[in-house]
Image: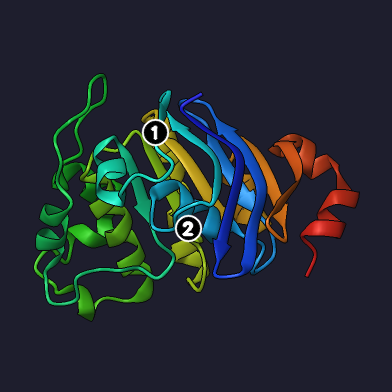
């Protein structure tokens, strides 16, 4: 297992958000965290990357305990994070945003370069000198993912990558995730869009009110109409 989360509990003040959260991800796997808005998907990711300090539980990345570590130290271990609010540097160009994220290559993995990323996201290649603040929401999402990849992570946390995007951009995003999977990258994806998730993920963990209520393969979830209706229907 590249990532193992066991008995994770996280609070915001007195609010108990995550309650004994547990999930595992094998190297090369794409796992999706599914659940309605407010289920605890983003808090899970922020707890893993260190932006929120868990009150209890274990988080192991590549066999090393990382719960409670500072985010920059976790990132240096090879764990990348793409937040849902697309935090690009508005005054920096596409190329400058990419340079901000640059880290060295990791053993056994091909290093990401701007040219490789422009093959993955052709839109970015056509606006290398455009400031991040003058890009559409979809373009900013692509740039945020590309900047994270410049850190050459082994595992990427993608928080709601399809949210608020036009259908054509959502399709491009799905194709990009499949391409990353083909590169051997491990991905934990948080989503509400079951159709989008079903096209890219190998496995799913369904959460409700901070608890895991279902876990298995995407094929099994597609076959489990009762679970989809109970936990994911709007």
Relative to residue 115, is residue 34 drawn left or right?
Answer: right
Q: Position of residue 90 (x, y in %)?
A: 19, 76
User: Which callout, 1 or 2, points to the residue nearer the camera?
Assistant: 2
Front in this rendered view, residue 160 or 42: 42
Mark 2: give few (<14), some (14-19) or many (20+) Cα within 10 Å: many
Q: According to the image, label 1 marks what residue? A: 185
- Which residue in the rendered view is the most extreme toward the right? 226
Front in this rendered view, residue 81 or 59: 59
Residue at 52 percent of width and 26 percent of height: 26
Q: Is residue 26 above or below residue 181?
A: above
Q: Quadrant of the C terminus?
A: bottom right
Relative to residue 107, is residue 201 drawn left or right?
Answer: right
Quadrant in the picture for residue 156: top left
Tell me which numbered mark, 1 or 2, is placed earlier along the sequence. 2
Q: Secondary structure at mark 1?
A: loop
Q: Are marks 1 and 2 in contact (CB under 8 Å)?
A: no
Q: Position of residue 66 (x, y in %)?
A: 39, 37
Residue at 86 percent of width and 43 percent of height: 224
Mark 1: give few (<14), some (14-19) or many (20+) Cα within 10 Å: many
Q: Give how far apart the Cα atoms at labels 1 and 2 are.
A: 16 Å
Residue at 56 percent of width and 46 percent of height: 56
Q: Secondary structure at mark 2?
A: strand
Front in this rendered view, residue 190 or 177: 190
Q: Is residue 98 above or below residue 94?
A: above
Q: Position of residue 159 (x, y in %)?
A: 48, 58
Q: Position of residue 81 (x, y in %)?
A: 37, 51
- Which residue in the rendered view is the most extreme toward the bottom? 134
Quadrant in the picture for residue 77: top left
Q: According to the image, label 2 marks what residue? A: 159
Question: Which labelled disc corresponds to residue 2?
Answer: none
Residue at 47 percent of width and 60 percent of height: 161
């Amino acid at each position: 297992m590249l990532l193992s989360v066991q008995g994770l509990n996280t609070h915001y003040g007195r609010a108990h958000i995550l309650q004994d959260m547990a999930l595992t991800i094998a190297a090369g796997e794409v796992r999706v965290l599914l659940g309605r808005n407010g289920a605890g998907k983003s808090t899970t990711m922020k707890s893993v990357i260190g932006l929120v300090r868990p009150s209890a539980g274990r988080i192991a990345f590549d066999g090393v305990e990382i719960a409670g570590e500072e985010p920059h130290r976790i990132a240096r271990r090879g764990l990348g994070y793409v937040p849902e609010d697309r935090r690009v540097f508005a005054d920096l160009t596409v190329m400058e945003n990419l340079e901000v994220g640059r880290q060295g290559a990791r053993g056994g993995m091909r290093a990401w370069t701007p040219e490789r990323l422009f093959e993955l996201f052709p839109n970015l290649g056509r606006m290398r000198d455009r400031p991040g603040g003058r890009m559409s929401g979809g373009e900013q999402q692509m740039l945020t993912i590309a900047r994270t990849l410049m850190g050459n992570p082994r595992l990427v946390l993608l928080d709601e990558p399809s949210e608020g995007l036009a259908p054509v951009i959502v399709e491009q995003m799905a194709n990009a995730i499949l391409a990353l999977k083909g590169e051997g990258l491990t991905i934990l994806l948080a989503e509400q869009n079951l159709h989008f998730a079903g096209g890219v993920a190998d496995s799913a963990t369904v959460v409700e009110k901070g608890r895991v209520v279902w876990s298995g393969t995407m094929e099994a979830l597609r076959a489990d109409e009762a679970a989809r209706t109970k936990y994911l229907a709007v």
